[in-house]
Amino acid sequence: MTVAMKQITLLGATGSIGVQTLEVIKQGTTPYQVFALSAHSNVSLMLQLCQQHAVRYAVMSDEASAQRLAELIKAEALATVVLAGKQALVEIATHPEVDTVMAAIVGSSGLAPTLAAVEAGKRVLLANKEALVMTGQLFMDAAKRAKAILLPIDSEHNAVFQCLPVAHLEQLPDPRIKHIYLTASGGPFLDRPLSALASVTPEQACAHPNWQMGKKISIDSATMMNKALEIIEAYWLFSLKSDQIKVVVHPQSIVHAMVEYQDGSILAQLGYPDMRTPIAHALAWPERIASGAPLLELFNQGGRLDFLPPDPYRFPVLALARAVLNTAGTASAIFNAANEVAVAEFLRGEIKFLDIPNVIAHTLEALPAQCSDNLDAIIAADHEARRIALNFTQRAMARSVL
Ligand code: NAD
Ligand code: MG
């Protein structure tokens, strides 16, 4: 029996999630043909990916990168059509021949094509949590209207999804669910005294103990902003209340999330910290395929799995996420934008690690949230939050009082 090939677009193909998605597809355990890939500026990796996957379209962010790629594609006699810019991202995300979109651009740059894929009713594999955090209700309403299937790639949300029977997914909010637990490794600085964090470098902050990831999410893991964004992500994906979503520090990163039901049962999803597992789950859903990730050797875990409460003083952004959910409207777009600025400034060596939560808290205080779920209001709030956050980092740097 021949299985119909599904066409997939990968937004953010050259990143950590993008490359691992292509690794799973290359195994041939699921019938996907790569329709289109996008990358910001990594021309050489994009060329390799086009060579390996017979891609129809490749999109680069700027004209100069697209031109360089087009020359190399021509020299290799490949049939890939090279495009550039934001509109081209939307086109490959919504093309009528495309069934599935992997949304794996990092940050707010992924919002427009991810939302467009949702509005076009695609099956959307959602790694780009920032897009959902920014737009919340609007994103979920668009998915419902267009009957888009949202499959979470974030390991914790994918784990929750796996612990919810399909029938429950159709009846959210689900009164049978009491709580969910999102696990957090605690990042690279879990055991360091708070006073020692003042001088950590971007390299140290990016060296995550369990996961290999892009730079932005690695810094987010070290500040726990990643978990803060994930609280908001879970709130929308699973129609939960803020106090139903618990964060638990689990340094081994073997249990990815747990769902507690009213009868006292807690269901968990376990596996090594390897993103190929949630990626393969979402690619094949509702089937199962081999992912290429090693199978968990339960007796090799040193005989223990630890679960600890997060320290609210060390990780102040967790409380900020709860406050943001209580405020609603544009607050979560402001929260996300301030963090994107703070992380970029930290990576540039312009601010210190412990300044990151201060930049976010200041921006939330300085910019009152609007009640609106309208996309223009969200984009305006994102831009204004960036301006305020950047201004704060520059002014404070000048006075060195951040
Ligand atoms: P990454 O930095 O490794 O890759 C980002 C991708 O986005 C690259 O292909 C890059 O070219 C592209 N990109 C960057 N800036 C862009 C711009 N301005 N315009 C267009 N494209 C741009 O990031 P990642 O670690 O793969 O993470 C991607 C997303 O997945 C993030 O939202 C992250 O939070 C989420 N996520 C990642 C992991 C992980 O293990 N890496 C786990 C869970 C969730
Ligand atoms: Mg995660």
Image (cartoon, rainbow, N blue to C red):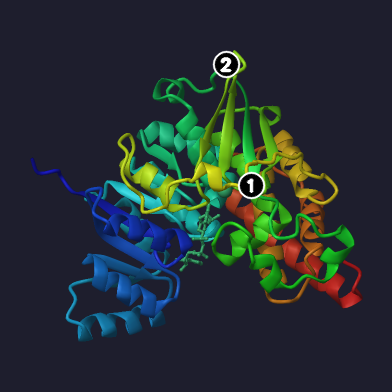
Q: How far from the left and from the top, in percent, is residue 352? A: 80, 69
Label 1 beta carbon within 8 A of ligand 1? yes
Residue type for callout 1: Leu
Q: Nearer the viewer, residue 9 or 377?
A: 9
Q: Residue furthest top?
A: 263
| Label 1 residue SS | helix
Q: Which residue is drawn at 21% across and 67% down?
A: 54
Q: Which of 226 and 368 is in front in this view?
A: 226
Q: Mark 1 points at which residue?
A: 229
Q: Is residue 261 above or below residue 274?
A: above
Dot placed on the residue nearer the N-terminal end, 1 or 2? 2
Q: Residue furthest left?
A: 1
> Which quadrant of the structure image shows residue 355?
bottom right
Q: How far from the left and from the top, in percent, is residue 317? A: 76, 49
Q: Which mark is residue 96?
A: none
Q: Mark 2 points at which residue?
A: 175
* Crowd around label 2: few <14 · some 14–19 · many ≥20 (10 Å): few
Measured in 3D between alpha carbons, the distance from the residue under mark 1 to the one under mark 2, in whole angstroms, is 24 Å
